Every structure is written in C-alpha cells, then in structure tokens.
Image: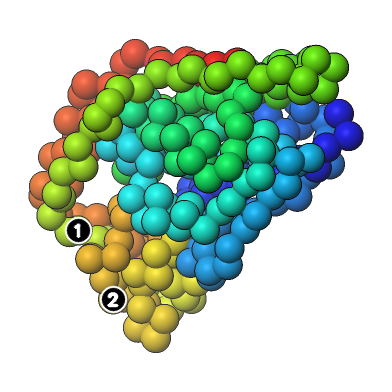
Amino acid sequence: MDKQLNLLYLSATDTTAKIVKEIAYGIGEPVKEYNITLPGDRQKELSFHNDEVVIIGVPVYAGRVPEFLTEYFVNVKGNHTKAVFLVVYGNRDYEDALLELEDIFEGNGFIGIAAGAFIGEHSYTGKLAAGRPDEDDLKSAREFGMKIKDKLININAHGKIEKLIVKGNYPYKERKYQQPVAPETNDKCINCGICATHCPKGAVDLVNFRVVDATKCIKCCRCVKRCPANAKAINQESFIQFTQGLIDKFSITRHEPEIFL
C-alpha cells in the first residue's frame, strides 16, 4: 500500500480501540496511534496529508457522535486524506452517528473510503453486549481491514474514489438534555487515584478522588471499571432504571457489525 496508516480514536473502556486495531491489522501496514481518550491528548491540532490513511473510531452516545468530540474534531484537518469511519455502540443502535462522523471529517478535508458500525459491551452494564467485541467481532474487523487494503490498491491503480454512502438520517437525531449524574465513591476507596488520572473528561478531582463533577461526567464508566477496589458506582435511581430498560429491550437480540465500502 505504501501509505502511512494512522489510528485516531477515543476508547474509554477499550472496546473501540480493540476494533480499530484489528482493522489496522487486517490492512497490514505499520501504524501511528493517536489515542485521544484523555483530555491532555485533545489539546493540539492534528493534520494529515494526502498520502496518508486515517482510521477514525468513536463510541456512540445516544445515536450521535459525543458532543465534546465534535468540538475537538474541528482541530483535525485533512488534505484529501483517505479515511475510514468507525462507530462502536452497545447493541442498541448507532442511528445517525456514522453519518455524522463522515460529515464532520469530509468537511475537514478527508475522503471517506470505508466505514463500519461495530458492537462493544455497553459502558453502563456488562449485561448488554457482554464481552464484545468477541472473537467473531474481531474476525469481522480483520476481514474488513483486508477489504480496505484491496480497495486502497484499486484506488492507487485507477485513481477513482466513489462517494461513500452510509446509514443515517437528516436532520441528525436531536440531542436531549439529560440530568447530570456521576459515580459515587464508597468506603472501599483506597485513594489510588486511578479514576482521576484516567477520566476522559477530567471529572474526577485530582486531589480528592471521591469527588466527581457530574456536569463534566459523560457516564463512560471508565472509573467504575478500572477501580481496583470496586469503590465507584452510579447509584442514582433514574440511571439504574434507564439501564435496566436497556437490558430488557436490547440484551436478547445480537446485533452484528455493518460495513460500508
């Protein structure tokens, strides 16, 4: 292929990262990673050239690209740069997220050549898409990467790129206001600080790790899942009821990856 392959992704609970990396493995080129999960990694502008390929992976939040990421992506520029768009959702639906991601980056100088919607264990609960991406998902991701490589070879030979068409609707699904909630900290806390140093939004206080700013929290549950003492959990009744509703409606049917080439 003879092009620099870049990985640009946010992955609070590692599901998006796993899929992005498997796609890259299928393409089979050396990669440069831009992991923008932490706030400090979203401070600088990024630019990519026309001889590069970028795989862009994000989680789906209520059928959309996370709003704070759309604000950051203004600072990511391409110059006729080939791109692969990837969204990962918790077995409910990705709705307009993939279309939105394509629009954002094609508006910033990128050219979409492929896209995919994959499934990862829901950040709220291990009872929804438990253990995903699993081996079947990762195999699909690798095979997707191989198809992308073939397409890149074809593009290099013929120089033609047809407009990429993905699922989604205009206008995008409306973002609805949600009451701020955040994990609470129980007496098991050992003050290790892992939650604070790993929070994608800097919502956990860097001095008093028991304090979480609900107005910053995006409920990715990274702190909950990484805590070695099981000291954090979201205990608000509204959140518990909403999560149970997701389990009741979407835990039985297994959604499969969708790809667009």
In-front residue for pair 213/225: 213
Lower sequence index among marks 2 and 1: 1
In-front residue for pair 201/156: 156
Question: Residue furthest toward the bottom?
Answer: 207
**Residue 219 x %, y %:** 31, 53
Q: Look at the image and tell me in which quarter the C terminus lies.
A: top right
Using the rendered image of the protein, determine whether residue 93 is visible from the camera's viewpoint: no
Q: Residue drawn 39% across and 56% down?
A: 71
**Residue 174 x %, y %:** 19, 37
**Residue 229 x %, y %:** 43, 64
Mark linked to residue 181: 1
Q: Residue drawn 34% across and 13% down?
A: 253
Using the rendered image of the protein, determine whether residue 236 is visible from the camera's viewpoint: yes
Q: Quadrant of residue 143?
A: top right
- The three-letter amino acid code for the residue at tag 1 is Val
Q: Look at the image and tell me in which quarter the N terminus lies.
A: top right
- The three-letter amino acid code for the residue at tag 2 is Val
Q: Residue drawn 46% across and 19% down?
A: 166
Label 2 element class: loop
Q: Write down the residue under mark 2.
A: 211
Mark 2–mark 1 contact, CB under 8 Å?
Answer: no
Q: Please say if 172 is above or below 225.
A: above
Q: Quadrant of residue 61?
A: top left
Q: Residue drawn 66% across and 20% down?
A: 161
